[in-house]
Image (spheres, grey):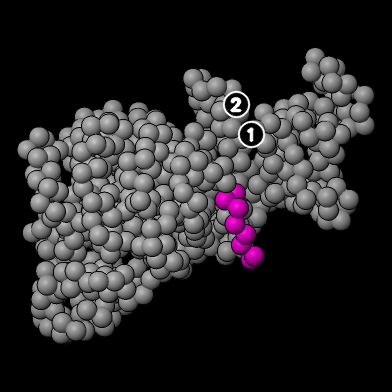
Amino acid sequence: MPANAQDILEQTFGYPAFRDEQAQIIDCAIQGQDTVVLMPTGGGKSICYQIPALVREGMGIVVSPLIALMQDQVSALQQLGIKAAFLNSSLNEAQKRDVAQQMQAGELEILYIAPERLAMQGSLDWLMQFKISMIAIDEAHCVSQWGHDFRQDYLSLNRLKTAFPDVPRMALTATATARSKQDIIHNLELNDPKIFISSFDRPNIHYSVASKQEANQQLEQFLTRHENASGIVYCLSRKKVDATAIWLKDRGHKALPYHAGLDKETRSVNQARFLREDAIIMVATVAFGMGIDKPDVRFVAHMDLPSSMEAYYQETGRAGRDGEPAEAWMVYGLQDVVQRSQMVDRSTADEQHKRSERSKLEALLGWCETTGCRRQGLLNYFGETLDEPCGNCDTCQNPPKTWDATEASRKLLSCVYRTEQRFGAIHIIDVLQGKDTAKVRQHGHDKISTYGIGNELIQAQWRSVVRQLIVQGYIFSDAEQFGALRLTESSQSLLKGELEILLREDVNDTKPTRESRSKIRINREDMPLWNALRACRKTLADEHGIAPYMVFHDTTLLEILEEEPMSDDEFLSISGVGEAKLEKFGAAFMEVLEENL
């Protein structure tokens, strides 16, 4: 095994250089420092903990919440010649004993383990007998009750500090607000961690949102620009998943359903087909997706409104992990808003948590209705600024109809100010519309200057104004203060009449430009060789019982097509080709090149 991080990157993983902050993150872990890594899906998080686990003495532990994620990553590591295994409920007793024997013999370099297993004191005591190199806690946002995917078992992971006091821990996530980030540090009891925050921008993804009219027909039209591509279609209910999958099958698509109501075997078979076959469309609830490391997902479509910006970002982040063009497409309607609101109201969570969830839903709705660049709004939600519009979203390419909302916005901001920034949107709108409610009378808001000055708009329009002002950063909904609307520094210019503001009037479907359509482009004369290389990859994948992308990603295959490597040294120069993959697959691909050139 190579001795240092750069050698491992080049010789094992087959990459010439680290990306962005990977080198700094890896160095901190190797030096024994706790770290928090916020990095978008497809940004290269795995290498950040896999390489330190190999450099430091002992066995690396990776805490992972989903069986699919463990199986996928362990298979990929094994193809690289790394000794890896996992422990979770999918293993029978004989398989668990085999993993234990490998550990006792000191043969394992990386062990993936489920958080619920670590929650058992016996498992923790057993692990303490081994030399542990580092501990990575993936999907760390699950530790935050204010995140979008809280899991109770994650709260017990603070015991890792006591069990392994001298072992560096790395918490990783692709989605975390400022509050979730603080929860990660506090709940995991990290020791003065170094925090790395990468850009959340996924410039290869084209974002588009449309009002829901005839949803199935809209989906079919959308799919016409993604022929022979793999993708995910998310639906809110199991019933809708089944119906949509059948509808797509009847129209000639290779569509499979996935939700918690299906038996385990069906889910497993459908997931395996999605990973290993081309042009499969997985129609699913959000039960599907976390940990699915399929790089060539060319689109993610939402047939219903997600629960929050965090959930939307994570779900759409499953598209285009290979860096090639991909699309995030969504349709939503009034019924979606009603359903999502009812789900929050009916939940067993306390009132403060419900208010937080409502605020997240309002932020997502505001983003759906924005007139500005979608990417700027999305990044702004996560505290990141994009100076120029992206040019790769529906609002940039087809600006929506707008109306001059300057006066209405000033009225609303003034009302927020005059009610002392202590009340939520519903009460503010009641004051603007001059409603005679007990709450308005109780606080004397029927006596202030903004009472009754907003009758030109109906409540739905005022709610749209609120949502859009939130997403544009003029106000924010303070979840810790019961959803009270508060002014930001940006609001001062608007209040003083120093600028004008246009808000969205409606939401129209748009098509991405030709350049943003999600398909790798091959010259006509190169197509025979490209198809031969893909066929070779599929044959090798079937022989090894793995997904095609675990042989080589499309980007690696494209480089092979362009560079035509005909020796071991030339093949090793291809990005994504390490020594283990050269030994396993190199000769077969070079034979294909020789036959077709």
Q: Residue at x 80, y 14 (%)?
A: 438
Disc sitting over residue 352 in the figure: 2
Residue at the top extreme? 438
Badge 1 amino acid: Ala
Q: Is residue 542 magenta?
A: no
391 relative to 288, above or below: below
Residue 536's image quarter?
bottom left
Q: Residue at x 73, y 43 (%)?
A: 475
Q: Residue at x 24, y 42 (%)?
A: 128
- Give how far across and how far down residue 247 sits, in percent: 32, 38
Q: Earlier in the sequence, mark 1 or mark 2?
A: 2
- Give how far across and how far down residue 492 sits, in percent: 83, 50
Q: Is residue 446 visible?
A: yes
For mark 2, give the secondary structure: helix
- Give how far across and how far down residue 444 sits, in percent: 88, 21
- Give how far across and how far down residue 289 sits, in percent: 34, 44
Residue 115's image quarter?
top left
Magenta span of residues: 381-388
Kindly check if marks 1 and 2 are in contact, taking CB atoms under 8 A apart as contact: yes
154 relative to 384, above or below: above
Looking at the picture, tell me which residue is in the foreground, 563 or 252: 563
Disc sitting over residue 479 in the figure: 1
What secondary structure predominates along the stretch shown in magenta?
A: loop
Residue 309 left/right relative to 534: right
For mark 1, give the secondary structure: helix
Looking at the picture, tell me which residue is in the foreground, 220 or 6: 6
